[in-house]
């Protein structure tokens, strides 16, 4: 009998008889599945948050802040300054209109649907040009807000997370009442957590005078960025800093993504060690209950390598079952689950959906298989080195 | 006691299994410790918040300032003990990812209202003498290696009168406090901010008020009184207890903490179940041996005790080491560099962990041991 047929014969025997060792095999499978669930679920949260933040950025867009400000919350400049910014070269034009919008970004307290407790929902004061600047924003319900009034359009994610955002309803904030007239979507990005209203109306309601916090600009092409930036930063009338939008949202997502990933990875690796121990235990039990069987095979002439591989194959198989099981549970349990949290950079809410991506699933399965191999190694060596004579005598 | 060697030898009859069972339990409790630390972080120290302290914030959002003139009005309400105010400064040291809270306060009232925040009296004196003085938490000082006497520049969205956004502070004191207190904050004097800032940056306003009341059972009525005082004014207010406020803040961070913890707890319990099953298995396969012991005249109770001692030992030894290691890791500090605050293993959870060990030990040993106890010797011996 050739070497390979031996290996396959013994491995197949092992895999087929797993059903007789259900109890202890379950230990390994459950342990490994648990690790995969934690790894995939926690990382899918980081992934979803990251995706929501970065989907808001486009390569041909830039943000203008006051120098020293790192986000929209802390930035601020006057109306005349905003007008100068809109004259910068490199901006895209649509007809007579320049695609740059001066905006305000404030927070408003709205109760969360899930807990009923107040949350800092971001409210953005926009100009008519804000919409062509963000071409991905699309109205899906109701109608567009009329400028010069107290009307707002709400992001789709916001309407699902916070109370009172149905089309036609009113929100009271201080002495101002806002009327929700429409709902928009925006590729599932962080913009969907926002409420958009007329910037001039918001200036009045928040007593901001003629000031803005940021200018969102759409460039002729990503390559025009340098020209745009150089003109603004070298202009003696302005004290501003310019950031590519993609980079801005990437930075905004960093803190939380890093936090979740650190927690996720450290917990998953700890649990991974635990699961490897579980697998080792299982395989040792499997080997010791079959001591006589293995010795018989060896006496019949099966070589040590095929015995070794057969034990590894069993542990690998159990790990694969655990990995797939964990991946499935994570996928059906968490993918698309919508929640919201606070973005620490601006203290504003961000709604996002868990994203169990194929890459995460592959990562989880890979991790499971590694655990299986490590867990099977020691018991496999032991099985291969069983002394035939004394093993046959064992009960 | 004389059975100790017997228990010991029984335990090590299968060295590999016992070793890995011990290791599994060790990992499970290490995880438990880390988990509870994270849980404490996400609750943001709610447990320490006082009920006799009320927070008065702007009704629309906490980011909007309140007039400084409210202080005198609030102080005049009967039942109010101390009124002070805080202002969020948003200071950034070198890089925006170096996040820590920077707050402008009134030194004496602030530390009077928060008795759990400890500052040596001579440092308080130095602070009162230095307008640019700042008092920081011991953990923050450790993180950036700041010492008393250091001069620290911070950038802020507040501008000074000369247009600069860079502010200089002298570290004059380090505050400390009991477990669970946020020791990463940076406090400085409000009068420095208010006098040096550009008047367009909200001169004469403060961030929010903290009020200590004389009788904590009156908090609801007083909160309504305060809010009614400023109703229909330019800046309407919303008053909550400090506990309610922090709780609300923690809820804003929201599900993400609770989801993570729910997943982990579920998995942790599965792990314990699996390990418990392995331990129980180890007892079950010795049924005939237990029967022999009973034949030799061991009482039912002794047999039960022997088995339980074994499983308890494994649970407590493995679990104890795990918790200890978790504690050691946690006391080395936050691995993310300041994102997880406060980072500590609460005493309450250590107690919970010990209780959990006992449960695992008893649960894993009790069922098979009880079975062994009830066993008829003849049946058990025949089984071989």
Image (cartoon, rainbow, N blue to C red):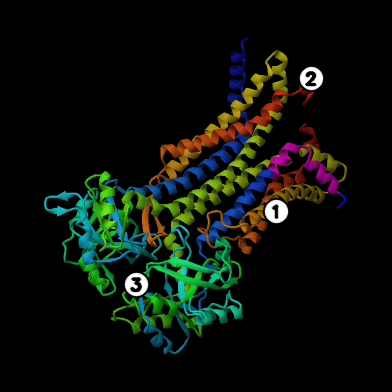
Q: Residues within 10 Å of mark 2 (few under 14, many from 20)?
A: few
Residue appearing at x 36%, y 50% in the figure: A247
Name the residue tied to disc 2: A389
Direction from residue A366 to residue A102 in the image, left or right: left
Magenta segment includes A106:
no
For disc 2, the chain is A
Which residue is tagged 3? B64
Judging from the image, what secondary structure is the residue with disc 1 in?
A: helix
Image quadrant where residue A122 sits: bottom left
Q: Nearer the viewer, residue B101 or B299?
A: B101
**Chain at tag 3:** B
Specify start and end residues of the magenta stretch as a single range.
B3-22
Residue B120 horizontal/vertical position (percent): 61, 77
Disc 1 target residue: B320
Disc 3 residue crowd, few under 14, some 14–19, many 20+, Cα 10 Å: some
Whole-Å distance between the Cαs marked 1 and 2?
42 Å
Q: Earlier in the sequence, mark 1 or mark 3?
A: 3
């Amino acid at each position: 009998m050739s070497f390979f047929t031996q290996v396959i014969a013994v491995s197949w025997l092992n895999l087929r008889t797993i059903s007789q060792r259900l109890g202890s095999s379950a230990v390994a499978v459950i342990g490994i599945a648990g690790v995969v669930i934690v790894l995939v679920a926690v990382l899918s949260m980081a992934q979803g948050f990251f995706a929501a933040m970065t989907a808001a950025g486009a390569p041909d867009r830039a943000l203008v802040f006051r120098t020293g400000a790192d986000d929209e919350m802390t930035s601020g400049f006057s109306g005349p300054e905003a007008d100068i910014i809109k004259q910068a070269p490199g901006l895209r034009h649509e007809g007579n209109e320049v695609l740059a919008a001066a905006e305000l970004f404030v927070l408003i307290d709205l109760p969360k649907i899930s807990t009923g407790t107040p949350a800092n929902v971001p409210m953005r004061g926009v100009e008519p040009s804000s919409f062509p600047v963000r071409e991905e924003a699309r109205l899906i319900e109701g109608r567009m807000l009329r400028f010069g009034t107290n009307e707002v359009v709400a992001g789709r994610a916001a309407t699902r997370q916070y109370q009172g955002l149905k089309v036609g309803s009113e929100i009271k904030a201080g002495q101002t009442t806002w009327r929700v007239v429409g709902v928009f979507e925006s590729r599932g990005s962080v913009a969907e957590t926002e409420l958009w209203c007329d910037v001039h109306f918001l200036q009045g309601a928040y007593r901001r005078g003629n000031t803005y916090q940021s200018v969102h600009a759409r460039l002729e092409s990503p390559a025009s960025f340098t020209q745009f930036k150089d003109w603004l930063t070298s202009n003696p009338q302005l004290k501003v800093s310019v950031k590519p939008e993609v980079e801005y949202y990437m930075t905004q997502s960093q803190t939380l993504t890093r936090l979740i990933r650190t927690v996720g990875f450290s917990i998953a690796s700890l649990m991974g060690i635990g699961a490897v121990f579980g697998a080792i235990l299982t395989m040792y039990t499997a080997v010791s209950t079959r001591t006589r069987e293995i010795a018989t095979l060896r006496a019949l002439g099966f070589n040590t390598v095929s015995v070794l591989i057969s034990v590894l194959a069993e542990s690998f198989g159990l790990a694969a079952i655990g990995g797939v099981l964990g991946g499935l549970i994570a996928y059906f349990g968490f993918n698309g689950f919508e929640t919201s949290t606070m973005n620490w950079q601006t203290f504003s809410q961000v709604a996002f959906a868990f994203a169990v991506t194929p890459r995460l699933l592959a990562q989880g399965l890979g991790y499971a298989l590694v655990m299986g191999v490590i867990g099977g190694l020691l018991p496999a060596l032991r099985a291969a080195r069983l002394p035939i004579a004394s093993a046959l005598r064992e009960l | 006691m004389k059975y100790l060697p017997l228990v010991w030898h029984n335990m090590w009859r299968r060295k590999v299994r016992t070793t890995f069972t011990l290791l599994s339990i060790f990992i499970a409790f290490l995880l438990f410790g880390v988990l509870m630390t994270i849980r404490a972080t996400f609750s943001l120290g709610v447990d320490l918040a006082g009920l006799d302290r009320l927070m008065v914030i702007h009704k629309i959002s906490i980011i909007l300032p309140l007039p400084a003139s409210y202080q005198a009005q609030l102080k005049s309400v009967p039942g109010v003990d101390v009124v002070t105010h805080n202002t969020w400064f948003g200071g950034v040291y070198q890089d925006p990812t170096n996040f820590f809270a920077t707050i402008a306060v009134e030194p004496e009232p602030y530390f009077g209202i928060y008795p759990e925040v400890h500052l040596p009296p001579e440092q308080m004196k130095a602070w009162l003498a230095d307008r640019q003085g700042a008092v920081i938490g011991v953990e923050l000082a450790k993180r950036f290696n700041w010492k008393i006497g250091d001069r620290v520049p911070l950038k802020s969205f507040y501008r000074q009168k000369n247009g600069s956004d860079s502010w200089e502070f002298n570290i004059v004191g380090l505050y400390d406090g009991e477990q669970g207190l946020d020791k990463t904050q940076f406090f400085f004097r409000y009068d420095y901010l208010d006098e040096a800032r550009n008047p367009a940056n909200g001169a004469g306003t403060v961030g929010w008020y903290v009020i200590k009341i004389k009788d904590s059972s009156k908090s609801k009525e007083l909160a309504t009184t305060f809010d009614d005082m400023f109703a229909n004014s330019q800046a309407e207010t919303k008053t909550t207890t400090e506990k309610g406020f922090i709780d609300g803040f923690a809820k804003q961070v929201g599900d993400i903490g609770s989801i993570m913890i729910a997943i982990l707890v579920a998995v942790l319990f599965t792990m314990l179940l699996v390990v418990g099953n392995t331990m129980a298995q180890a007892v079950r396969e010795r049924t005939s041996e237990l029967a022999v012991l009973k034949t030799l005249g061991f009482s039912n109770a002794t047999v039960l005790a022997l088995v339980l001692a074994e499983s308890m030992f494994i649970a407590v030894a493995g679990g104890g080491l795990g918790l200890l290691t978790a504690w050691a890791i946690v006391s080395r500090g936050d691995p993310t560099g300041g994102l997880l605050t406060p980072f500590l293993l609460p005493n309450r959870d250590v107690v919970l962990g010990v209780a959990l060990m006992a449960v695992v030990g008893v649960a894993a040993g009790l069922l098979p041991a009880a079975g062994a106890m009830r066993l008829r010797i003849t049946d058990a011996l025949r089984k071989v």
